[in-house]
Image (cartoon, rainbow, N blue to C red):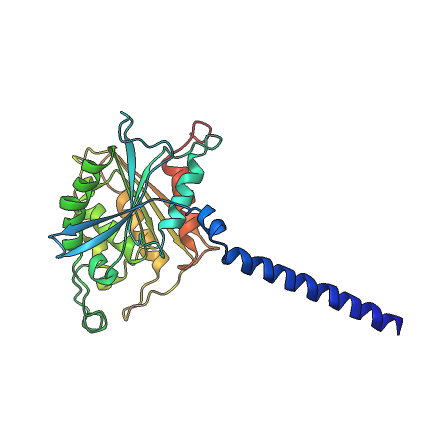
């Protein structure tokens, strides 16, 4: 009997606490003053750019580093992020940039991050394929040439005219974004100084990009370019012709390493504990450590 009474008392106390908590929360939600006292947490700004190359308006999510002032003389590197929508990679990459900006870490220079929000990534990130099943499966694919022209002729000039930028430009792309970043590296390498290529979908068009002629392989290529290529334990690609993504990434690295140019630095990072879905955070963190070495890491 005594045990039953104790349990009843405990139950009544818990019930009263729950009712009190609910009542307080409800009162706060209906209290205009408390709502008025709340302020939004602002991570960046949203720009919109009308693209003639793409024939549509594109949304840009922009992170400006702490202390950014348009009236200062300080100019900042720019990190261009593919898959840069708010519900994709933008928030996560900005967090890694901001973390590495902390004075007690000071690994990455304060940088502007430009997240390019997606409209149709299969259209924008792939070049034309000769594989009939992929043509039928991905009806809008194969327009990367237009997207690269958008980056070169519209996006970069827009950012450089509106924001205080220096000459250091990085691109980050994962999966199909990694395929696009690789295509830019091989076809138009001077668009960026640093390439962070993660789990690139090189299987596209039976990995034809691995045979793409490129000026970066020539000894006359004289622009200092740093390249990070990271891949997880990913296995077979989603292609009809079998491709192992780790193998394709290795082939890309070896091809770049065989360049006659002395102005390329390429880093290969195999992350066997990560897969295609989990690799991005760790790979970008590792890339920052390799592409921006501190004095103690040199």
Residue farthest toward the front in the current orientation of the protein: 32
- Residue 80 percent location from the top left of the image: 28, 45
Figure disc tally: 0
Is residue 279 depicted above or below 188 in this figure? below
**Residue 161 placement, left or right of 255:** left
Q: Quadrant of the C terminus?
A: top left
Is residue 270 depicted above or below 156 in this figure? below
Residue farthest toward the right in the current orientation of the protein: 2
Front-lying residue, 166 or 202: 166
Residue located at (44% from left, 48% from top): 36
- Residue 119 percent location from the top left of the image: 24, 60
Residue located at (83% from left, 67% from top): 6
Residue located at (49% from left, 50% from top): 34
Q: Is residue 273 visible?
A: yes
Q: Quadrant of the N terminus?
A: bottom right
Residue farthest toward the top in the current orientation of the protein: 73
Q: Is residue 217 visible?
A: no
| Quarter location, residue 126 | bottom left
**Residue 147 placement, left or right of 200:** left
**Residue 44 placement, left or right of 35:** left
Front-lying residue, 164 or 78: 164
- Residue 29 percent location from the top left of the image: 50, 57
| Quarter location, residue 217 | top left
- Residue 186 percent location from the top left of the image: 20, 47
Front-lying residue, 296 or 277: 277
């Amino acid at each position: 009997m005594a045990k039953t009474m104790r349990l009843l008392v405990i139950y009544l106390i818990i019930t009263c606490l729950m009712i009190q908590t609910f009542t307080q929360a409800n009162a706060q939600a209906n209290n205009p003053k408390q709502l008025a006292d709340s302020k939004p947490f602002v991570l960046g700004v949203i720009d919109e750019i009308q693209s003639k190359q793409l024939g549509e308006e594109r949304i840009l999510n922009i992170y400006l580093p702490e202390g950014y002032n348009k009236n200062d003389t300080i100019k900042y590197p720019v990190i261009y992020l593919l898959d840069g929508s708010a519900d994709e990679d933008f928030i996560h990459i900005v967090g890694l940039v901001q973390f590495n900006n902390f004075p007690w870490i000071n690994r990455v220079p304060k940088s502007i991050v430009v997240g390019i929000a997606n409209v149709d990534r299969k259209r924008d990130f792939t070049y034309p394929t000769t594989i009939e099943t992929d043509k039928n499966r991905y009806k809008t694919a194969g327009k990367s040439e237009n997207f690269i022209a958008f980056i070169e002729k519209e996006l970069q000039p827009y950012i450089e005219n509106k924001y205080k930028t220096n000459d250091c430009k990085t691109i980050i792309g994962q999966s199909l974004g990694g395929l696009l970043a690789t295509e830019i590296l091989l076809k138009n390498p001077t668009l960026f100084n640093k390439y962070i290529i993660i789990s690139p979908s090189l299987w596209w068009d039976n990995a034809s990009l691995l045979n793409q002629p490129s000026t970066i392989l020539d000894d006359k290529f004289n622009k200092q370019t740093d390249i990070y290529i990271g891949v997880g334990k990913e296995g077979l690609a989603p292609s009809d012709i079998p491709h192992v993504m780790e193998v394709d990434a290795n082939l890309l690295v070896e091809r770049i390493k065989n360049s006659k140019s002395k102005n390329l630095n390429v880093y290969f990072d195999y992350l066997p504990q990560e897969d295609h879905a989990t690799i991005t955070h760790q790979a970008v963190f590792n890339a920052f450590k390799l592409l921006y070495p501190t004095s103690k890491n040199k």
